[in-house]
Structure formats: C-alpha cells, structure tokens
Image: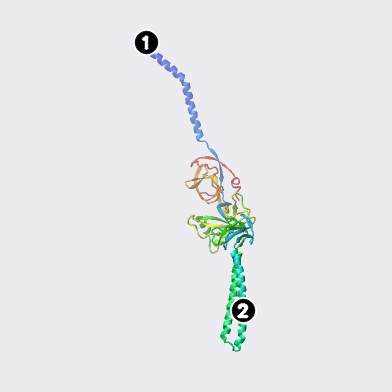
Amino acid sequence: MMLLILSSKKIQTKRFFYALYLLPAIVLVTASCGNKNTQAASQGQQVLDYKVVQVQPRQATLNVDYPASIQGQQNIEIRPKVDGYVEKIYVDEGSIVTKGQLLFKINAPQYEQEVRTAEAGIKTAEADLALAKMQLNKVKPLVEKDIISHYELESAEYTQQSKAAALAQAKAALVNAKVNLGYTTITSPVNGVIGALPYKLGSLVTSSTTDPLTTVYNTSNVYVYFALNEKQLLGFSRDSTAKTSFKTKLNQLPPVSLILPDGSTYEHAGKVETVNGLINTATGAANVRADFANPRGLIRSGSSAVVRIPNVVKSALLVPESATYELQDKRFVYVVDDQHKIKNVAIKVMDNTAGQFYVVTDGLKAGDKIVLESSGNLQDGTEIKPNEVSAGSVYGGVK
C-alpha cells in the first residue's frame, strides 16, 4: 500500500515539473497570437489616401464625333448615247480632267453616212424649192392675163410651200445627223477625277449598256454625310420657333472639323448645310450633310472619315470620365462628405465623345468633392484620406 502511494506522488511531481517546462512556450504562443490580432485590427482600420477634386461650374467646348461617308459634289456617269465600238480612250483611271476635255472616241461610221445623206437631201430640197419658185413665177402673169385659171396659181403656191417645208426637214435631218455624230466623241462635262474604265479598246457599247464608260467625280467640294438619331435630332430642333427656324439654327452652328482615316484633322473647316427631313425607319436616324472645300483634291469620293462637332456648354459641372464607373447601365461617382467618408452617387450625363469629360446634368451640385481614382470597389461609408488636387491640374486642357 505504501508503494502505491509513493508511486502516485512521483507521477504528480513529474506532471508538475512538465507543466513548468511547457509554460514559457504557452506564454510565447499566446503573445504571438495576440500580436497578430492587434496587427490585423490595425490594418483593418488603416485609412487610404485618394485624390479628390471639387467640382465647380465652368464653360467648356466638348467635341462630339460622328462616323461619316464622303461623296463628291458631282458623281457623273459617262454613258454612250449611240451604238458603236470604243475606238480611242484618251484618259486613264484616276486622271484629273477639266470640263470639255476629250475622254472617248466611238467608232460609228453609220452616223457619218447619215450626215452625208442629210447634206445631199438638203441640196435636193433646195433644187426642188428653186424649181417650185420658177413655176410660181411662170404662172402668176398668165393668171393675171386670164390665160389660165386662178387654180393654177394656188397650186403653184402650195407646191412652193411644200418644197420649202421639205428643205426645212432636210436641214433638221442634217442637224440631227450631226448631233448623233457628235455623240461619238465624248468629253468631260465637269472638272473632276476619272473613275474606273470597265470597257477597253474595241468593246461594243450601246445606249442601253448597264455599266457606264466611266464616272467623273467632281470633288472641288465634297459632301460629308453623317447621322443624328431621333433623340439628338429632337434636342436640336425642339427650340426652333418662328423667330428661330430650323434653317436659322443650322446657319448658327459652328464650323465642324473632319478627322481623316489617318487620325489627322483636315485643313479646311466645314459647314453643316442640310438635315434630311425623313428619318430612316431601319436605323432610326436622319442623314445630315456637311460641306467641305477640297481645292487640292486630297479627299476622294467614297472614302470614310469622322465629323467632329464642337459643343459649347456654359456653367456646366464637368467630371473626368476616369472618375466614373458604370453599373447596370448607370454611371456613378464617389462623393466625399465632410467626415471624409465615401458615398456612391448615380449621375446623369450628356452624350459626348469618349475619352473626354462628362457634363453632369443631375446627381451632383457645385462644391461637391469627388474621388478622381475610380476603381469601382469602394463601399459606402468607407473613410479615406482625401488628397485634394487643384482644379487647374484636372481641367487644364478644357477650353
């Protein structure tokens, strides 16, 4: 019995010393966990630094871009009016021609024959008329002396009138034959540029040929066509009154620019001249035409470009596009309150070209501070450290 008691005491003593041995390690682990929790708590409470700017009303000129197609002032199809073979081609594709310059010669000998026949017909008619006049002069004195009846005189007069009409008809036939013969020589009706030449030497062409001999593009001025949707067109014409008609508003529009396919701006400014009165039911848009001078022939008919229309806004709240984000077809900004806390605010903006400033029509007021660095993941109520930047650094490029 004594042996058992001693053994039990030995086991308890060993456990006591083992616990003392592990105590420093337990304290170390506990301290380490406490430090980690403290660090995590301090990190969760860290306030991040964001750039903010105060929005104020200002005047700005914003550009609105529209895809456009270009047509020459005149695109004239050159078609043959007579049947024949292409005998000569005096120009090449892409050649610059002037009004009256020779383009084609059509071999049609039948028209030369018609001219000769008409000339001979005139001579015959002139001889017949002269004979009728002689006959009338012969009859007149005989009628006056009652040698022959008055009927003979009237018959001679009618014969003379008939021969005179035949002469006039022969002259008309000659004019017509010469006109047809003139159609065998084709000249340019305007100054312009030659298009494609589908027919080569020796090709048979007729007045009913499907393809034209060529097309002359008069590009001294070019028409640039772009489209306005119903909403844009309605906004433009809503204020048109008797005092300010639609045409007057067109005339008051500022000059527009043309952005060429290489990204450069065309050297000449254009003017919006007309708006199609019919809205295309398929596209829901109406065509608008702007006119541009093209003295050097730099712009070719059929090319594409972008029309840039300046839009002057007065006393508008401007927000950089980079400071906004889009969610479910709505646009938002981060507004900072007096306690430096974030609030997501939905805004309404005007349509304008991407990459510029948005004109806010609803959702913001003058004096509001917005976060410039929009990441789309800040939550309402998040506290930040606002780093306010000057408006000049943000809106310096706005004119």
Please identify, in this view, whether the residue under mark 1 or under mark 2 is nearer the observer.
2
Locate residue 238 relative to residue 8 in the image: left or right.
right
Query: Element type at marker 1?
Result: helix
Residue toward you, 266 or 399: 266
Q: Which residue is mark 1?
A: 3
Residue 150 against residue 24 in the figure, above or below: below
- Place of residue 43 in the rendered image (x, y in percent of width and height, measured from the top left): 51, 34
Query: Element type at marker 2?
Result: helix
Q: Residue drawn 58% across and 75% down? A: 166
What residue type is disc 1 on?
Leu
- Place of residue 347 in the rendered image (x, y in percent of width and height, measured from the top left): 50, 48
Mark 1 or 2, nearer chain start: 1
Q: Residues within 10 Å of mark 1 (few under 14, many from 20)?
A: few
Q: Which residue is mark 2?
A: 131
The quarter of the picture where residue 149 lies is bottom right
Residue toward you, 236 or 176: 176
- Place of residue 261 in the rendered image (x, y in percent of width and height, measured from the top left): 59, 50
Alpha-carbon span between mark 1 and mark 2: 178 Å
What residue type is disc 2 on?
Leu
The residue sitting at the top extreme is: 2
Residue toward you, 1 or 373: 373
Residue 33 against residue 363 in the figure, above or below: above
Can I make out residue 220 in this image? Answer: no
Q: Residues within 10 Å of mark 2 (few under 14, many from 20)?
A: some
Q: Residue drawn 49% across and 32% down? A: 40
Q: Quadrant of the N terminus?
A: top left
